[in-house]
Amino acid sequence: MKRVAILIAASPTPAFYSQIAVLMLALRKLAWSDWTPSVHVFLGGPSDPDVDAAWRPHLAAAAFHCVSQQHFAADGDWAQSDDLLRCAPRDADVIVTLDADTIPVAPLTDVLDLILQTEAVGGVIAHYPFPFFPGCSVPDSWQRVAHGITDAPLDLAFSHTLMPPETPADLRLTPFYVNGGVVFFPRARFDDLLMQYLAIRPRLISRMPNTDFTGQAALALAIAVCGVATTALPMRYNFPNDAIAEQLYPDELAQVRIFHYLRTDTFDRQRIFVSAAEYGRFLSLPLSGSNLLFQRYVRSLIGVDYPFGE
């Protein structure tokens, strides 16, 4: 059997615990063919023993890794995100990093086979560029980010996925810069990427206008440095609950594999799974588009009854 390790960085809060519990329930409902999945959760930040005691029984199948208080004090949420990569299982054939606010709703074995066979990093190209430096185009911004870190060419061969095709090229084109919510890694190339990523990401903190995007940018640079093959996956593998995505990718929505419920204009992603009352409220919402389809998948995979007690 081939092995896939699913890695999730989180804080020890009801919101994160509930999202991961739902994600794990969904994973158990999928067909895995000749793959064996395992889930690894990397926690950082202050914890509440009562919260831990309430949620850990629902997450018993996951392996937990807690970052040190010193590491978290120094690096904040990047502590668990970096440890997620640093401590990835060595016996996996493919590693998948997922945000907690994602939920697989259909089998993933075809893309796992693709990543294993091609030894390529796979992900959906990011929706938009990272926030620009004032007065800079996208290519100029990438050159400023990469300066002194790598001379490897950054091939602007991809288009940001939620920007219409008529958008000018200097705003739309990008290197292989993927949305970090779902990324597939071949284990055979992972250690080289990890070494470069961990060296690059801290250096971007002082040179990017918004540090939230340093992880995604560091991965793009690490891939360029290592010369790793890449596969730009179709939107179905990281579909956001987003009206623009619905308009641009209706065929992808019809065959979605992983939902990324990151938009909060219709419901609060941090509350919908934390209690029976919140879950019932979410299932009763009059939704439309991708939100409606997400709601239907949740009802089908998780059920109408709240699965985690009261």
Image: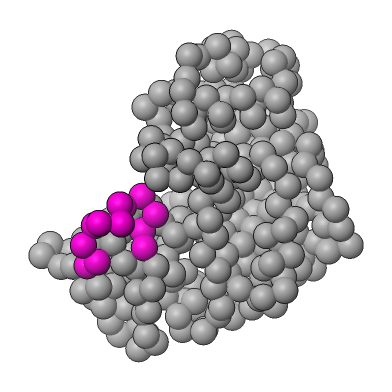
Q: Viewed as shown, does residue 272 lie left or right of 76?
A: right
Residue 58 location (% of width, % of height): 75, 31
Quarter of the image containing the C terminus?
top right
Q: Viewed as shown, does residue 107 lie left or right of 157?
A: right
Would residue 282 be visible to someone looking at this image? yes
Would residue 44 be visible to someone looking at this image? no
Please name the residue shown 31% across and 52% down the image: 163
Q: How many marks?
A: 0
Image quadrant of residue 201? bottom left
Please name the residue shown 71% across and 52% down the image: 108
Image quadrant of residue 84? bottom right
Quarter of the image containing the N terminus?
bottom right
Residue 112 location (% of width, % of height): 71, 61
Please name the residue shown 46% across and 84% down the image: 225
Q: Between residues 92 and 140, which one lies in front from this camera angle?
A: 140
Q: Is residue 128 magenta?
A: no
Q: Residue furthest left?
A: 135
Residue 36 location (% of width, % of height): 83, 55
Q: Viewed as shown, does residue 27 lie left or right of 234?
A: right
The boundaries of the magenta stretch are: 159-170
- Position above or below: 114 against 276: below
Please name the residue shown 72% across and 74% down the image: 117
